Image (cartoon, grey):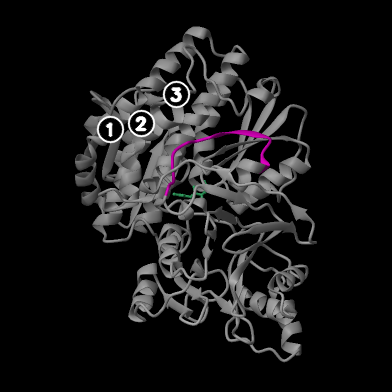
Amino acid sequence: MCGIIGVVGETNSTQAVDVLLSGLKALEYRGYDSAGMFVAGPEGGLVKAVGEIVNLEEEVTSKGEAFAGPSGIAHTRWATHGEPTVENAHPHTDMTEQLHIVHNGIIENYQSLKEGLSAQGMQFSTRTDTEVLAKLIGAHYEGDLLKAVRSALTMVRGAYGLAAMHAAHPDEIVVARLGSPIVIGVAEDAHYVASDSSALLPYTKRMVYLDDGDVAHLTATSYHVATLEGTARELAPETIEGDTEAVQKGGFEHFMLKEIMEGPQVVRDTLRGRLLSDNAKLGGLEPLLPEITSLKRLTIAACGTACLAGHTARYWLEEYAGIPVEVELASEYRYKTNWPEKNHALLAITQSGETADTLAAVREAKELGMLTLGVVNVVGSTIARETDAGVYNHAGPEVAVASTKAFISQLVVLALITMLVGRESKHLSRVQSAELVDALTALPKAIETVLKTAEQVKAVAEKYAQYEHMMFIGRHSHAPIAAEGALKLKEISYIHAEAYAAGELKHGPIALLDENFPVLALAPHDSVYEKTVSNIEEVKARKAPLIVVVNKGDTEAARLADDVIEVPKVHPLLQPIISVIPLHLFAYYVGTKKGFNVDRPRNLAKSVTVE
Ligand code: F6R
């Protein structure tokens, strides 16, 4: 939510504009309401534009080559306080217009700070919390930027990832972190700052991840990290994997389609080195294995799509690993009364590893004395670092705002955890787990088969793009998959979509159905197939247009449907991973048919770092 990028280079370099623009493009998934940059030095200045980064790029280009400098900071915004306008775009400045800041997060006490500053005669041109922060730092500035940032931040309540520059010190950037991610990139002749390491990969792989409460001072040749109180912290750079290619579209029209199509490779990457002949090998969990296998209860906490991965895995963990599981919306978890027990852990599932609600759930569980585990995609992210143990997805960077490939990899990791715990606790026999290993090994091929039906799914999607409503149904572990199909459709096509466990239809929602309310039913050949077919009959009787997703060769459910999408039959535990792929494709093709920018749905941002 909001993206920050900054660079401080040698005085004779002119790289800042290119670094800032390319960094903003890499971070655009974090917000795209407006953007801006400050380039230090005599040929620099402040430029802002509303809308996507290309609009800022046009503004910058119109200034010609004379607009250049070695250092600068930039920001892409997802509006919290104040509408997306040029005035509200970052960087914000102090009263002298010499100090510039970019900020990700929310300053909770900005109103009272603003009143205090107004009483000192300061005027504000926006209603944003960031302008208040800029003016507050300005009020503390007496010639030392680091000192000013530090003393201003002692007065602030809320969350920030922050980068500040002052025209009087064009060769310095001061950054600070509390609740919103900040990573420093270390290179020979420059230092960088960003909200996410992927934006820095073209320049360096050596990253320093700040912790909450850290403040850092960067020059072209040095970085120093200390706590807000000034105690020095030795944070050595970590070398990360990854390449810039992974964040390019690679010939696809949208990142979302590219990421859906990456499914087979994502599964291979997630499984790499983690399959034994009859068990899973998860190095991150090994040290805690005795504790994990004796769990009496597991709470899964996550948001959105990640939470639906948790709901799906709940069926697996209960059936194959013998652990009672409850799944909580992370945004609600810490506001309810929780009753931790002995041998009770919390498992956070998150692609970004930065989702504020999920992080708050992890912290709440820690305070309650629970073991905390994570299934996280972004290496080095806050939740990956704050949980006691965990498993990385290895899905690679997910750029499209709507999560697809991360969901697939979350399910694969959760299947591995199910197998590991089930095997250790003897709920899963050696023969059963060997079967599961074979099924996981064959999964990429099965996904390839589903992806070959993309054109057929496209034809179905285009037929249904004109409807205003849609219902998704499924039973058992396919109920959360129906919910994922509905979430994805509303998110990128703005069609009102609902999801119900199929058996629930008759308890209310069936009243909605008529010839204008299509239903997509998931009816794989599983233990509840016949019940699902009965529910499909109920839908048919209400004349709702009907799409079914069934296993190849199905006749019963298929004969009732207007449109049929066939998927291969795989191991029952893995079937949801196969069934969700046509739903991701369906949402993608409805969204593109309606002409929307599916990679950047309105009002959304990829990494939700505000509560
Ligand atoms: C939906 C989607 C969101 C995220 C949710 C959690 O397509 O992407 O619902 O799943 O915001 O994000 P992470 O996984 O980063 O915690």
Give me the C-alpha separation between circle 1 and circle 3: 17 Å
Residue placed most toward the observer, 531 or 16: 16
Pointer 2 with pointer 1, Cβ within 8 A? yes
From this view, report whether residue 589 is shown above or below residue 594.
Answer: above
Residue 193 showing in the rendered view: yes
Q: Residues within 10 Å of mark 3 (few under 14, many from 20)?
A: many
Question: Would you name the residue on which mark 3 appears?
Answer: 573
Element type where label 1 sits in the image? helix
Please, what is the three-letter code of the amino acid marked with disc 2?
Ile
What residue is shown at x 72% (from left), y 82% (from top)? Answer: 139
Question: Would you name the residue on which mark 2 appears?
Answer: 578
* Magenta stretch secondary structure, dominant: loop
Pointer 1 with pointer 3, Cβ within 8 A? no
Q: Which residues are magenta?
A: 386-398
* 1 or 3: tag closer to the N-terminus: 1
Element type where label 3 sits in the image? loop
Please, what is the three-letter code of the amino acid marked with disc 3?
Leu
- Of all residues shown, which one is farthest toward the bottom? 121
How far from the left and from the top, in percent, is residue 367? Answer: 78, 43
Question: Would you name the residue on which mark 1 appears?
Answer: 450
